[in-house]
Amino acid sequence: MQTTFDIGPMVRKYSAVCSEQVEVIHDITTFHLSEIARGIVLMFAAGSGHSVTALQRLTGLISKLNVEALELKVIDIESMTEQDMIRVFGRVFHGYGETLWIEAGKVIAQLEAFEPQSEPLILTYTKQLLAGRPERGH
């Protein structure tokens, strides 16, 4: 499903991580989960305040870490049908800024939505991913 709205300017505006480090995925057919060695993937819905908040909090927290070794990807949720989501991720996303931590092409931790109590989890999951010793998260 091709998107007509470019989320790139929104992502650049609200990200605390330099824009060169964040890859915006506009077309899910160009995304390959299995090719991510270590990375963080955020599902972004342009019309969702939850997504904007998730992007701001995630990038604000991880910008304090040395995340240059990680792939940071923001996927336009409008680029996927429910069938695409199930095929690629095994589940459906709802536009709340769902975030996945990926190692060796596998989801090793995830957050469904960002709440103040999520901040320690974001740091924990990211530090574990950077250290190469991630643990499963919810």
Image (cartoon, grey):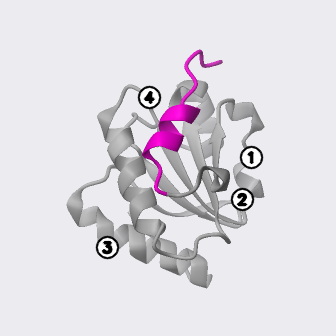
Q: Secondary structure at mark 3?
A: helix
Q: Secondary structure at mark 2?
A: loop
Which mark, by number, is residue 36? 2
Residue in the picture at 22% in, 65% down: 117
Q: Secondary structure at mark 4?
A: loop
Q: Amino acid at mark 1?
A: His
> Looking at the picture, how far across and down is residue 128, in whole percent?
52, 80
Camera-near label (3 vs 2) is 3
Tell me: 110 left or right of 103.
left
> Looking at the picture, how far across and down is residue 21, in whole percent?
65, 56
Q: Residues within 10 Å of mark 2 (few under 14, many from 20)?
A: some
Which residues are drawn in magenta?
Answer: 1-16
Q: Amino acid at mark 4?
A: Ala
Q: Are marks 4 and 2 in contact (CB under 8 Å)?
A: no
Q: Check disc 4 and report the residue beneath it.
A: 46
> Looking at the picture, how far across and down is residue 101, in whole percent?
54, 62
Q: Secondary structure at mark 1?
A: loop
Q: CA distance from mark 3 to mark 2?
A: 24 Å
**134 vs 25: above or below:** below
| Quadrant the C terminus occupies | bottom left
Q: CA distance from mark 1 to mark 2?
A: 7 Å
Q: Are marks 1 and 2 in contact (CB under 8 Å)?
A: yes
Which mark, by number, is residue 32? 1
Q: CA distance from mark 4 to mark 2?
A: 24 Å
Residue in the picture at 40% in, 44% down: 97
Q: CA distance from mark 3 to mark 4?
A: 26 Å
Mark earlier in primary sequence (4, 2): 2
Residue in the picture at 38% in, 25% down: 47
Which mark, by number, is residue 120? 3
